[in-house]
C-alpha cells in the first residue's frame, strides 16, 4: 500500500501526516484480522479463538483514541487547510468506522460462545464465510482507496455494497427455512443470523470508509452522487 501525502515546507508536518496515515493502515490491519479470526472461530466453533478476538478489541479501541488525539493535536497546532484538513478530518471518521468493525468482530465472537455443537447444514457456515470474504475485500479496497486517494476504487466499493446486502438476505432466508424445518436449531440459527447481520454492518462501514476516500480524493461528498452510482456501468 503506497500512502500518498502532500509535501510541506515544515518537514515535521509531513512526518505527522505520514504517521497518521500509517496508524490508519495499522488499525485497518488489526480490524481485518479480527473479522477473519472471528469468522474462523464461528465456522469451527473455536471458543478459545473467539475469546482471544474479544480480548484484542481493546487494542483497536486504543488505536482509535490515538488517531483522534493525533488529529486534534495537528488541527490545533498546524491549522491545516484544504487537502490536509480534509485528510485529517477524514482520518477521524475512518478510525471511528474501523473501531465499529472491531465491535462487529467482537459481537460475532460473543455469539460464537453461545453456540454449541449442533446439526447445522455446512452450507450455512459456507454462506457466512463467503459473506466474510466479501466484506473483507470491501474493507481492503476501501482502505487502499483512502491511502492512495483513488476515487474510482472508492466508487467501486459503494457499487458492490448491494451484493453484500443480497447475500445477507439470502442467508436470512436459508436460516429461517432451516429453523422451520427443525425447531431444535432455532437458538443456533438465531445466533448465526446475528453474526450475518454483523457482517452486513461491516460492509456498511466499508462503504463509509470509501465515502471518506472519495471525499479526500475529490473534495466532494459521495452522498450527493449515490443515485448516479446505482446507474453507472461497472468498470
Image (cartoon, helix red, strand yellow):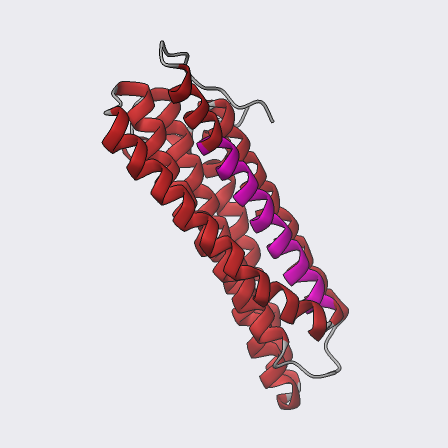
Q: How many marks?
A: 0
Which residue is rendered at x = 61% and y = 56% of the image?
34
Q: Is residue 108 left or right of residue 129?
A: left
Residue furthest bottom as drawn: 184
Residue 184 appears in the rendering: yes
- Give coordinates of residue 76: x percent, y percent: 23, 32
Q: Is residue 185 above or below residue 85?
A: below
Residue 29 sits in which quadrant? Answer: top right
- Give coordinates of residue 156: x percent, y percent: 50, 32
Q: Is residue 104 above or below residue 76?
A: below
Residue 172 appears in the rendering: no
Residue 129 sits in which quadrant? Answer: bottom right
Q: Which residues are magenta?
A: 20-43
Which residue is rendered at x = 53% and y = 44% of the image?
27
Magenta-span inclusion, residue 41: yes
Magenta-span inclusion, residue 102: no
Which residue is rendered at x = 65% and y = 80% of the image?
115
Which residue is rendered at x = 35% and y = 35% of the image?
90
Residue 155 sits in which quadrant? Answer: top left
Quadrant location of the C terminus?
top right
Q: Nearer the viewer, residue 5 or 146?
A: 5
Quadrant location of the N terminus?
top right
| Principal secondary structure, stretch drawn in magenta | helix
- Give coordinates of residue 130: x percent, y percent: 67, 54
- Give coordinates of residue 85: x percent, y percent: 29, 26
Q: Nearer the viewer, residue 231 or 210?
A: 210
Q: Is residue 156 left or right of residue 95?
A: right
Q: Is residue 119 left or right of residue 79?
A: right
Amino acid at each position: 500500500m503506497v500512502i500518498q501525502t502532500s509535501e510541506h515546507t515544515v518537514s515535521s508536518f509531513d512526518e505527522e501526516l505520514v504517521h497518521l496515515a500509517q496508524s490508519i493502515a495499522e488499525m485497518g490491519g488489526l480490524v481485518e484480522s479480527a473479522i477473519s479470526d472471528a469468522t474462523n472461530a464461528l465456522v469451527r466453533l473455536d471458543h478459545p479463538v473467539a475469546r482471544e478476538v474479544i480480548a484484542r478489541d481493546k487494542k483497536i479501541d486504543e488505536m482509535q483514541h490515538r488517531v483522534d488525539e493525533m488529529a486534534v493535536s495537528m488541527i490545533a497546532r498546524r491549522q491545516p487547510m484544504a487537502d490536509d484538513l480534509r485528510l485529517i478530518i477524514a482520518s477521524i471518521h475512518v478510525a471511528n468506522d474501523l473501531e465499529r468493525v472491531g465491535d462487529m468482530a467482537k459481537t460475532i465472537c460473543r455469539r460464537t460462545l453461545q453456540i454449541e455443537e449442533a446439526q447445522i447444514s455446512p452450507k450455512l457456515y459456507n454462506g457466512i464465510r463467503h459473506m466474510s470474504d466479501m466484506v473483507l475485500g470491501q474493507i481492503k479496497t476501501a482502505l487502499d482507496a483512502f491511502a492512495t486517494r483513488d476515487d474510482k476504487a472508492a466508487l467501486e466499493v459503494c457499487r458492490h455494497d448491494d451484493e453484500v446486502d443480497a447475500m445477507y438476505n439470502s442467508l436470512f432466508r436459508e436460516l429461517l427455512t432451516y429453523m422451520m424445518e427443525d425447531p431444535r436449531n432455532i437458538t443456533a440459527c438465531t445466533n448465526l443470523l446475528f453474526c450475518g447481520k454483523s457482517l452486513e454492518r461491516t460492509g456498511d462501514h466499508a462503504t463509509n470508509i470509501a465515502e471518506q476516500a472519495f471525499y479526500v480524493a475529490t473534495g466532494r461528498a459521495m452522498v450527493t452522487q449515490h443515485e448516479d452510482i446505482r446507474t453507472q456501468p461497472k468498470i
